[in-house]
Image: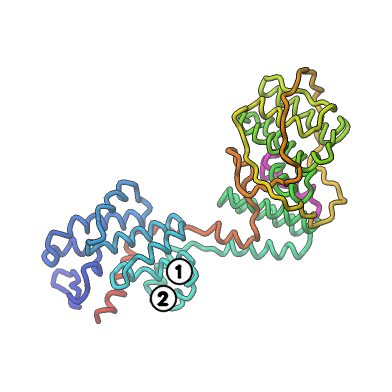
Amino acid sequence: MNRKSSGTIEISCALKHDYYIPSEILNLPNIFGTNLEDEANILRDGFESRTNGMFDRNMGDRLETIEADSPLYSWRLLIKAVSDLYSNDLTALEKSIAEIPANCGPALLVDVLIAVADLPSGKEKRGSFSRDEKKLYNLVSEDRRFIKSVVMQLNDSLEAGEDYFFEFALLSIKEVREMSEEASHRLALWCLNTVYLEDFDYTVFLDSLKTLFSPARVMRFSALILTDEDPEEGIKCWLLSLIFRIREGNLENIEAAEYLLIISRLMVDIIGGKNAIYSDNGEIGQILKLLHSELSSFFITTLSPFSEEKPSFHFPEVWAVALAPSVKLNFSTTEKPRPAPTKKTEQKIHPMQLELFGEPTEEGEDPVIEVESVSKEWDPSHEITRSGLLSPKPLNSPEELKVMLRARPRYVGPEPWLDVIKRKRRNLIR
C-alpha cells in the first residue's frame, strides 16, 4: 500500500472492488470510473443510516436495486446482517452472515457481528480480537451484567428459602418489566409455578403480585398455573379473572365469550363426568352467581340465570353464546389421563374472597348445549383465543431471560465499524 499526495489510500489492485469502502469509491472515481458511483452512494448512505439508527423503508428499497452480479453486492449483504443484528433477529443474522463472501471488505466485520450477537462461537472470536475489533465490540455491546445477576440471584434465593425467594422474585419481575413486558409476564408465571411446586405460601405470593399487575391479570396467571396442577382452583381463578376484567370497564363481548368458553370446557372436563350440580353454597356456585350479575349489568343484557337444576358447566357456555354467538374455540384434546399434581394439594388455595352483589331474577329457557366427551382432557397446546387468554407460557428456567432480554447493540455510527475494515484490510496487503 502507498499513500497518494492527496491523502487518500490506494489499495493494491490485487484486491477486489468490494474491499473498498463505498465512500472511497466515491472519492476515487478516476480508478473505478462512474459505473459504480450510484451503487456506492446508496451503500454509503445505507450503512451510515443503519449504524446510527436512522434506517428507513425508503433506504431498504434503494438497497434492493443493487443486484447479485454487482461487484459491491457484498456490502448490501453486510447492511442486511447489521440490520438483523439491530433488530435482534439472530436467526436471520446467522443466515445473512453465511451469505457474505469470504474475500471482501464486509467479511472483515463478520467476527464482530458474531460476538456482539453472542452467537455460539462469539466468545471464541472475542479471544482473538484485534485492538480495533475490541474497541468496536465494547462500543456496540451493552452491559449484560444485570441480567446475569438476576438469573443467578433468582436461583440462589430459591435455595435460601421462601422469604428470600418472595422478596427477590418480586424485585426481579419489577426490574425485568422495565425492559420487557412479555419477559416480566413469563417470569411471573415461572415464579408462581415455582412457589406452587416448592410448597411455599401460594396465596401470599399471589397477593404480592397484585402490587405489580392488575387483579385480572394476576388471577389469569394463577389460572394458567393451576389449571393442570389443581383444576378446581384453576376454574375459580378463571372466573375471578373474568370478574375483575369486567370491573376494569373495558371488556369486549368477544373476550368475555372466550373466557366463558374456556371456563365451560374446563368444567366439563373436571366436574362434568360426575354430572355434578354445584349448590349455591358451593364456592364455584357463588362465584357463578356473582359473575352472572356482573355480566348482566355490564353488558346491559338478560342472561340465563344460574339454577341448581342444571350442571354448573352449562351456564358459562350459554352466556358466551348470548354475548358473542360467532365466537368458537377449537380446543385440542387428548385421550391421555390427566397427570396427578406434582405437589400435595391438601392446603386449600383461596385466591380471593368476594362479596356477592344480589341474586339474579331473570327467567327463561336456556338453549340446549351439547358438550364434548369428558373422556378427553383439554390440551391448550396453542393459542386459540383472539384475546391471548392462554398466553404467555412460563419460562422453563430463569436462564431464558438471557435470550429474551438480549440487549440490542448501541448505535455508534459507521466510523468504528469502518475502522475495523481499514485496519484488517491493511494487514492483508502488507
The residue nearer to you, when weighing 71 against 312, is: 312
**x and y percentages locating residue 356 in the rendered image:** 81, 28
Q: Per the image, is 257 magenta?
A: no
Q: Is residue 403 left or right of residue 86?
A: right
Q: Viewer-proximal residue, 171 or 292?
A: 292
Q: Is residue 34 left or right of residue 423?
A: left
The quarter holding residue 28 reads bottom left
Number of residues whose C-alpha sits closer than 10 Å to that of mark 1, classed few (under 14), some (14–19) or many (20 or more): many
Estimate the x, y position of residue 316 in percent, counting from the top left.
73, 31
In this view, the residue in front, 87 or 321, is: 321
Highlighted magenta segment, given as a residue range: 200-217
Numbered badge on residue 106: none
Residue behind mark 1: 115
The three-letter code of the residue at mark 1 reads Ala
Q: Which residue is mark 2?
A: 129
Quadrant that contains the C terminus: bottom left
Looking at the rendered structure, the kind of residue marked 2 is: Phe
